[in-house]
Image (tube, grey):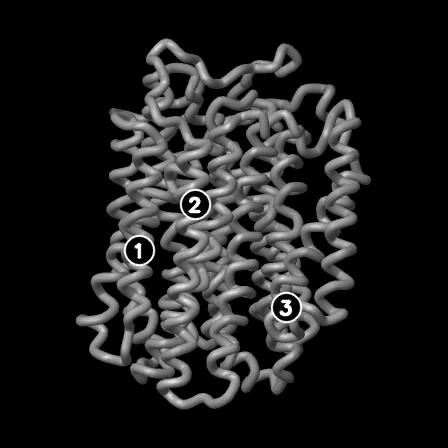
Amino acid sequence: MPLTPAGPGVRPAAALALLVASHFLLNLDSAIVEVTLPSIKQDLHISLAELSWIANAYILAFGGFLLLGGRLGDVFGRRSVFVTGLLVFGAASLAGGMASDAAVLVAARAVQGLAAAVISPTALSLLMTVFPDRTAEGKARRNKALAVLGAVAATGGSAGYFTGGVLTDVFGWQSTFLVNVPLTVLAAAAAPRLLPAAAPPASRRHFDVVSGALAGGGMTLMVYVLVGAQRTGWLSARTLGPGALAAVLVLLFVLRQRTSPDPLLPLRIFRHRSLRGANAVAALINMAIGPVIFFLSLYTQELLGYSAFAAGLAIVPVILTVTVSSTAAGWLLGRTSQRSVMTTGLLLFLAGLLWMCRISGGAYWAELLGPECLVGLGGGLVFVTFTVSGTTGLDERDAGAASGVLTTAQKIGASFGLAVLTTLAGSRTAAADSGQVLLAGYRTAILAAAVPVALALAATARWLPGTLPAPSESPVRRHPQDSPQVVGESA
């Protein structure tokens, strides 16, 4: 089925390519720098503590401000906010590539994270605008577009390990930052020609600064706690103090949204069962997939003796199978229920983990290739389905907020999963670092990753629809105050 635009003057295929490329770039950048850290440490002569902040600054800013970033597009115009985010990301990348000390590099990574928190949810809400699902035909087109997004963007994190190794070996660690500069400039220049622009309603020009501060502070503190919990201990003052403050800030944020006439996060979106289920699954599956890729990278390098480049190649089967199944997900969602597609993906993913946790240090082809393919096939189905479930049936005015919530669920899930699973692995490897002890730790972590996947199956059965919607249903509702889309108008 050809992709058709939401309005005249929009080229849907070109718009989709731009939005998908932006998602891929952000996911790539989340992982690409991790491979370069040893080179950065050696070149800039920095401590391990400073080195950890180069990685964590991006995660903290990205995860902490997603809710805020998603709503900015609803308030000030999605295309304008998207372009601004791209330009800020490019400028921060340039600063990072030219940095000569740790402080500048950490600051650049933090600004990259802030820009990413704007770009990611705004790109998803723009996709929802380009491909409205008011009719059965429109729903099929959106599913196809989301399948393409899932196929390409979901591979970004895995591809980052591979790309980072290549760029660092050939051009130096600075290239992993500088490569973003021309890409973001080109994307920002193309956006006004390819993306629709609708001026936000006058009622949305007000921005609740207090809500933004509460959301940003609370989520940033939450990610900070999760990032450092394994190192400092779950019951340490460093964990419990900021954790309690984060909980208070988030609670105050929720209470403010209940009484605000124009909330930053409209709580009405959680009345949708499928949205609740999608966010639960998004958080739970990311508790598994990110940490598993992390432990696979360690396993192949520390126990199988692979180089960083070879370890990146070892993850390629996950990338390829995610691409295949993400593409298939769009077709399947037009013919069977979200619950069926999600359940199939989760069962494949779970089977892959249970097979993978039997690793014994043997040949890659015998022990990892098969499990990786199952994980990738299941993951592609799951990623596309929770994106469809989490963005369907909403008022158009809430698209940015829903996108921000969905992306936040993924980032919080990934941070929490990595913190918990590294703690479990560390409890098995604390006594020694011999091959067998490390192997036992990695096997424990991979087996534990099956728990959130099993919980995701329960969430799917509880909340996701088990039937296809009737062809006559019109799931997207427009608010009476929403102005119609005006293509070509400056946002």
Residue 375 percent across, percent down from the top left: 30, 55
Instruction: Please provide percent x and percent y for residue 372.
Output: 27, 61
Picture coordinates of residue 391, whole percent (x, y): 48, 31
**Viewer-side residue, 35 vs 463:** 463
- Can you tell which mark lies on residue 456? 2
Asked if residue 291 lies left or right of residue 377, the reply is right
The residue drawn where x is 78% and y is 45% is 213
Q: Secondary structure at mark 3?
A: helix
Q: CA distance from mark 1 to mark 2?
A: 15 Å
415 on left or right of 151: right
Label 3 to label 1: alpha-carbon separation: 27 Å
Could you tell me which secondary element the residue under label 1 belongs to? helix
Quadrant of the rendered structure where residue 252 is? Answer: top right
Disc 3: which residue: 229
Quarter of the rendering containing residue 245 = bottom right
Q: Is residue 193 at all visible to an observer of this figure? A: no
Query: How many badges with numbers are in the image?
Result: 3
* Within-10-Å neighbours for mark 2: few <14, some 14–19, many 20+: many
Q: Secondary structure at mark 2?
A: helix
Label 1: few (<14), some (14–19) or many (≥20) C-alpha neighbours in 10 Å:
many
Q: Which one is nearer the viewer's eye here, 438 or 206?
A: 438
Q: Relative to 306, is 485 on the left or the right?
A: right
> In the picture, residue 221 is in which quadrant?
bottom right
Single out the mark in the foreground, 3 or 2: 2
In the rendered structure, find residue 18 and report the number of the disc placed on it: none
Q: Residue at x 63, y 30 (%)?
A: 74
The residue beneath circle 1 is: 375
Residue type pointed to by label 1 = Val
First reached walking from the N terminus: tag 1 or tag 2: 1
